[in-house]
Image (tube, rainbow, N blue to C red):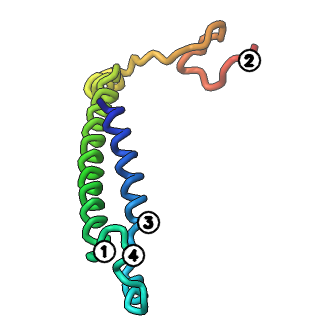
Amino acid sequence: MEAIVLIAHVLLAAGIIALVLLQQGKGAEAGASFGGGASQTVFGSSGNTSFLARITAVLAAGLFVTSFVLAVFAKDKADAVVNAGVPAAEVIEAQAGSGDAQLPVLEGSPVVPADADVPTAD
């Protein structure tokens, strides 16, 4: 399910990029008054502003929804990772407070008494 939403998210993002690049800027309207008539437009005499703006708005809404769904998936995964074998804070504090914490010792290394200031040299 997450893969499908991710693919849709990427396609929506690519679609928004393409539609924004297709749209004309505000300065392009001034050139139309000097001979560039509306008869040459693909989307009719009303121009492409309303059509492309509506499609862009629909794709933007879809991108928002898929972003929200992906955030929910990420939160669920983060909750699963937090609970993956890590002991609770109370357990860690209890072990640290006991003072008998055993530190790992390398195999074959001499055991040095805790009250020794200088370790023995082999």
Q: Earlier in the sequence, mark 3 or mark 1?
A: 3
Kindly identify the amino acid type of the residue bearing the numbered disc 2.
Ala
Q: Residues within 10 Å of mark 1 (few under 14, many from 20)?
A: some
Q: Earlier in the sequence, mark 1 or mark 2?
A: 1
Q: Earlier in the sequence, mark 2 or mark 3?
A: 3
Residue named by callout 2: 121
- Position of the N terminus, as image quadrant, is top left
Q: Residue furthest right?
A: 122
Label 4 and label 2: CA atoms lie apart by: 92 Å
Q: Earlier in the sequence, mark 4 or mark 2?
A: 4
Q: Is residue 3 above or below residue 102?
A: below
Residue named by callout 3: 21
Kindly identify the amino acid type of the residue bearing the numbered disc 3.
Leu
Q: Nearer the viewer, mark 1 or mark 2?
A: 1
Q: Residues within 10 Å of mark 2 (few under 14, many from 20)?
A: few
**Most foreground residue, 26 or 96:** 26
Kindly identify the amino acid type of the residue bearing the numbered disc 1.
Gly
Q: Is 114 left, or right, of 68 in this rendering?
A: right
**Residue at 38 percent of width and 91 percent of height:** 33
Where is residue 67? Give x, y as percent.
29, 47
Residue named by callout 1: 47
Label 1 and label 2: CA atoms lie apart by: 88 Å
Q: Nearer the viewer, mark 4 or mark 1?
A: 4
Tell me the element at label 4.
helix
Label 3 and label 1: CA atoms lie apart by: 16 Å
**Residue at 66 percent of width and 21 percent of height:** 119
**Tags 4 and 1 touching, CB below 8 Å:** no
Q: Nearer the viewer, mark 4 or mark 3?
A: 4
Label 2 and label 3: CA atoms lie apart by: 73 Å
Residue named by callout 4: 40
